[in-house]
Image (spheres, helix red, strand yellow):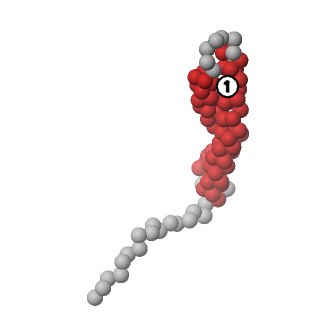
Amino acid sequence: MAEEPQSTTLAHAESTDPLVEETRRAEHDLVRWIVIGIAVAVPVCVVLFMASVGFDVSYESAPLGGPLAMAAAVGVLAGLFFGAWVGFVFKGHTFDELDRKASRREDHPSRQA
């Protein structure tokens, strides 16, 4: 007699808790804002760093390739940092509100928010 293979899919229980759903939504928004911030900040920082270094090196008789490549690399790193920072600044208040709701819920367990 042949045995049927067991399913390898995990049983995924969907949460019906509105606070959990609101937290997931807030996390999704945070990631979205971080990606948008990085997408805007990286080109801006690269241009600013390359312009600054290009202006400074233009007075010397040294070749521009190396310093401009370094400025571009530093601009990418600065853009990653500042883009992520901007995302957190714009969406950080959402997590503060979620913490307040969760603490109110713990203080009054009979009332479901």
> Which of 21/101 is in front?
21
Q: Is residue 59 visible?
A: yes
| Residue 30, percent from left and from top | 65, 45
Residue at (36% x, 77% y) in the render: 5
| Residue 73, percent from left and from top | 59, 29
Quarter in which the N terminus is drawn: bottom left
Q: Quadrant of residue 97?
A: top right
Q: Is residue 43 left or right of residue 17?
A: right
Residue with the most extreme bottom position: 1
The vertical placement of 26 against 85, above or below, is below
Residue at (69% x, 11% y) in the render: 59
> Which of 64/88 is in front?
64
Q: Name the residue carrying label 1.
A: 50
| Residue 55, percent from left and from top | 71, 17
Badge count = 1
Going by the numbered disc 1, the residue's amino acid type is Met
Using a 10 Å C-alpha cutoff, classify the residue at mark 1 as few (fewer than 14 neighbours), some (14 to 19) or many (20 or more): many
**For numbered disc 1, what is the local secondary structure?**
helix
> Which of 86/27 is in front?
86
Residue at (69% x, 15% y) in the render: 58
> Which of 49/38 is in front?
49
Q: Quadrant of residue 15?
A: bottom right
Q: Is residue 86 visible?
A: no
The vertical placement of 109 against 39, above or below, is below
Residue at (60% x, 27% y) in the render: 69
